[in-house]
Structure formats: C-alpha cells, structure tokens
Image (cartoon, helix red, strand yellow):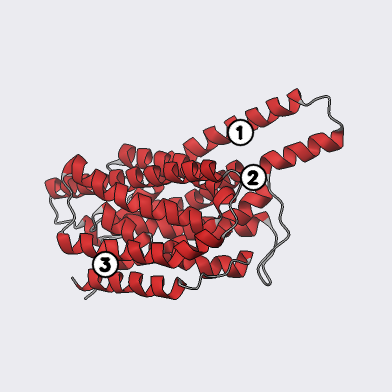
C-alpha cells in the first residue's frame, strides 16, 4: 500500500506544477506584491472556514506554524513572485523546488535529528535527477533574461524560505503529536486531516501578515519613485507606474479569461489551498527533504500547463526526465 504521506506529497506536486503559470499571469495583471497578497487573502478565507468547522481552529503550536507561514508564504512567496518574471515558470520552479529539497533534508537532520533513510535518500536523488534531466535542455535553450542573476538570487531565497518553512512545520507537527499523546485519548495526528486545516490556517495568518507589510513597502517605494519623477508628463508617469506594478502581456492560453480574479483565484486554489495544505498533510509522516523531493517534480508538471497557458514547449529530453522521476517516485512508494 502506498503511504499516505507520499500520496499527499504527489498531490502537492501536481498543484505546484500548475501554480507558477497562474502566478505569472496574475503578476502581469496586478503586480507581484498585490498578486501575492490577494492569493493569500482568498486562501485564508477558504482555509479559515475549514479550520473552524472541520479542524480545531487555532492549533496548539500556532506560533510555530505562523512563523513557518511568515517565512514560506511571506518571504518565500514574495521572492518567488519576483523570480518568476525574470526566470520563467519552469526555470524558477526548477531552482526553487530542487534546492528546497536538499536544504530541507539537511536542516531537519541537523536541527532535530530527523534523518532520511538510505533508500529514501537514494530514491529522492533519482527523482531530483529526473527533474534536472527533463528541464536542463529547455533551460539551456531559453533566451537569458538580462537580469538572470537577480532572478536566481530571488529563486534561491525562495528555496531557503520554503525549506525552513517545511522543516519548522514538521517540527510543529511533531510537537502537536507529543502534546496529543500527553493529553491521552490516542489521537494520531499523522492520520487525522483535522489538524492539517488548523496548521494551514495558522501558516496563512503569518504569511499574510508579512505579505501585507511587503505590499505596504512596495506602495511606499512606488509613490516615492513617482514623486521623484514629478517633472514627467502624465502619460510618462502612468507608463512608469505600470512598469512598477504590472508586466502586460497579451498572450493567453486557449479560452482563458484575462481577468485578475480568475488568475488570483486559480493561484490561491492550486497554491495555498490545495498545494500547501497537501504538503502539510505529507509532513505529518514524511521527512521534510523527502516531501520536498516529491514536490520537486512540480517543474515537470509545470511544462504542459505553461505550454498551454503561456506557449512554452517541452524540451526534447523532457519525457526521459519524467520517466526517471516517476521511477524514483515508484521506488520510494514501494520501499
């Protein structure tokens, strides 16, 4: 039988694969700071209802989960949203997900001795190798953005934030399990989805707080830049402000509306609502590095969705990379 944690991590990978293309479209329509805030607002409303109806409201380790959300959603989400326009969805996802898997595995092991078994480490590396093989030809063939290095720095920052967020969430889940055992009653946190909604809600609260602070900072900087350009004509000032907030692009997937609510809602659904909630579910029973390694398959999933939405074409060796990653996943599930 396939472990529940592996299934949850696969669901997270599927959702993460769709999210970058939706995020890029919402960024073009709203700007990276506002798009990040609105997706968290939508997600917080949905997860909040579930947390206080099906779940346990605010969890026992709310502070730890909030800090994890502040780093992951707030800092990591902001950095990812800045990296996407500079790197493109596949490359940004490749850097973030693979680097996050390695960082999360090492950090959990060093911090609180949450080690990965040799079979898990081996199959996780096979999955990561498949991701790299599948996307490397595409990355090499893509025209470099003039600010590529800046995009890579933001992507690495997002990876470290995502890794720390996952590890801290894992530690908080283990603490929740210990508290439940101390109270008695035989509650099995790793098998109960009720705790997932509460943990996801606490994470979103912390993430939204940081995202709002970053949005306020972005608005302040944009207004100061406008004041400094007060001598420009009204048309020129409008063009400059548009460059700060959005990156318009007329390309769209077939039949998809060019409406902010559609892309913000899609980004919230596949990101914080389904993707991150599934990842929290996976972290109940999986070491953070293993869970992140499965989620790192998201860039392979992102290629078909990005091709449909934004016109990307898979590289020639894409199928080989997918096959290797799937074999690694199968080995992990059966080990």
Badge 1 is on which residue?
A: 218
Badge 3 is on which residue?
A: 4
- Other residues around mark 2 within 10 Å, as few (<14) / some (14–19) / many (≥20): many
Q: Nearer the viewer, residue 218 or 187?
A: 218
Q: Which mark is residue 31?
A: 2
Q: Nearer the viewer, mark 3 or mark 1?
A: 1
Q: Nearer the viewer, mark 2 or mark 3?
A: 2
Tell me residue 253's x, y (percent): 65, 68
Q: Nearer the viewer, residue 152 or 326?
A: 152
Vertical relation: 330 (above or below) 76: below
Tell me residue 256's x, y (percent): 67, 67
Instruction: Look at the image and tell me in which quarter the N terminus lies.
Output: bottom left
Residue 281 in sight in this render: no
The answer to whether marks 2 and 1 mark residues whose Cβ atoms lie closer than 8 Å is yes
- Residue at image point 58% right, 36% down: 215
Q: Earlier in the sequence, mark 2 or mark 1?
A: 2
């Amino acid at each position: 039988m396939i472990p529940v944690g592996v299934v949850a991590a696969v669901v997270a990978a599927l959702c993460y694969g769709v999210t970058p293309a939706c995020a890029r479209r919402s960024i073009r329509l709203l700007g990276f700071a506002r798009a990040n805030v609105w997706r968290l607002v939508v997600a917080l409303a949905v997860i909040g209802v579930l947390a206080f109806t099906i779940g346990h409201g605010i969890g026992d380790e709310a502070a730890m989960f909030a800090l994890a959300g502040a780093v992951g959603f707030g800092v990591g989400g902001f950095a990812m949203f800045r990296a996407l326009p500079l790197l493109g969805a596949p490359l940004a996802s490749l850097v973030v997900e693979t680097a996050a898997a390695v960082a999360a595995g090492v950090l959990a092991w060093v911090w609180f001795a949450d080690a990965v078994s040799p079979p898990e480490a081996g199959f996780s590396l096979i999955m990561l190798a498949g991701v790299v093989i599948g996307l490397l030809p595409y990355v090499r063939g893509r025209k470099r953005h003039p600010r590529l290095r800046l995009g890579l720095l933001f992507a690495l920052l997002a990876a470290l934030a995502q890794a720390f967020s996952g590890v801290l969430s894992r530690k908080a889940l283990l603490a929740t399990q210990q508290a439940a055992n101390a109270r008695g009653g035989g509650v099995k946190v790793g098998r109960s989805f009720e705790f997932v909604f509460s943990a996801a809600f606490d994470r979103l609260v912390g993430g939204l707080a940081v995202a709002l602070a970053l949005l306020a900072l972005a608005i302040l900087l944009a207004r100061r830049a406008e004041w400094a350009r007060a001598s420009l004509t009204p048309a020129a000032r409008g063009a400059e402000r548009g460059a700060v907030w959005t990156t318009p692009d007329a390309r769209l997937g077939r039949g998809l509306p060019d409406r902010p609510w559609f892309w913000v809602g899609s980004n919230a659904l596949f990101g914080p609502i389904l993707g991150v909630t599934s990842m929290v579910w996976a972290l109940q029973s999986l070491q953070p590095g293993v869970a992140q390694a499965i989620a790192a398959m998201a860039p392979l999933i992102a290629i078909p969705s990005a091709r449909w939405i934004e016109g990307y074409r898979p590289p020639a060796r894409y199928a080989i990379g997918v096959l290797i990653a799937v074999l690694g996943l199968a080995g992990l599930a059966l080990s």
